[in-house]
């Protein structure tokens, strides 16, 4: 994979992510985790894909702000 994770100086994607609902962010995190699981760890390419998808899930997690006790539990 040749994608580089970092600042592109275009913060449109971050703004879009910030504006998503809590449930949309949680769903996206679960999707990224599922993709990481499917990537497999038995090849270098699989490990790179896992790292990419896990990094994407973490980026979304940073924008996950719980509002209320129920969401707090879900975040944990």
Image (cartoon, rainbow, N blue to C red):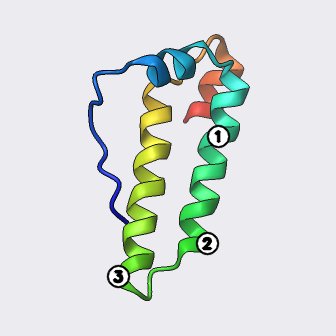
Marks 3 and 2 close (CB-CB < 8 Å): no
Q: Front-most of 10 and 6?
A: 10
Q: Is residue 35 above or below residue 5?
A: below
Position of residue 69 measured from the top left corner of the image (x, y, whole percent): 66, 17
Q: Is residue 15 above or below residue 24?
A: above
User: What separation in Å lies between label 1 and label 2 (alpha carbons)?
Assistant: 15 Å
User: In the rendered image, which residue does mark 1 sit on?
Assistant: 28
Position of residue 3 measured from the top left corner of the image (x, y, whole percent): 35, 54
Residue at image point 60% right, 13% down? 19
User: Quick check: 50 left or right of 6?
Assistant: right
Q: Secondary structure at mark 3?
A: helix
User: In the rendered image, which residue does mark 3 sit on?
Assistant: 44
Residue at image point 66% right, 50% down? 31
The number of numbered badges drawn on the structure is: 3
Residue at image point 41% right, 57% down? 52
Q: Earlier in the sequence, mark 3 or mark 1?
A: 1
Q: Earlier in the sequence, mark 3 or mark 2?
A: 2
User: In the rendered image, which residue does mark 2 sit on?
Assistant: 38
Determine if residue 65 is in view.
no
Position of residue 33 measured from the top left corner of the image (x, y, whole percent): 58, 55
User: What separation in Å lies between label 3 and label 1 (alpha carbons)?
Assistant: 25 Å
Q: Secondary structure at mark 1?
A: helix
């Amino acid at each position: 994979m040749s994608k580089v994770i970092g600042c592109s100086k275009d913060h449109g994607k971050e703004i879009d992510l910030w504006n998503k609902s809590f449930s949309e962010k949680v769903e996206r995190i679960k999707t990224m985790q599922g993709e990481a699981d499917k990537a497999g760890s038995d090849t270098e390419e699989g490990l790179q894909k896992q790292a990419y998808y896990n990094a994407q899930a973490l980026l979304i997690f940073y924008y996950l702000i719980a509002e209320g006790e129920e969401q707090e539990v879900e975040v944990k």
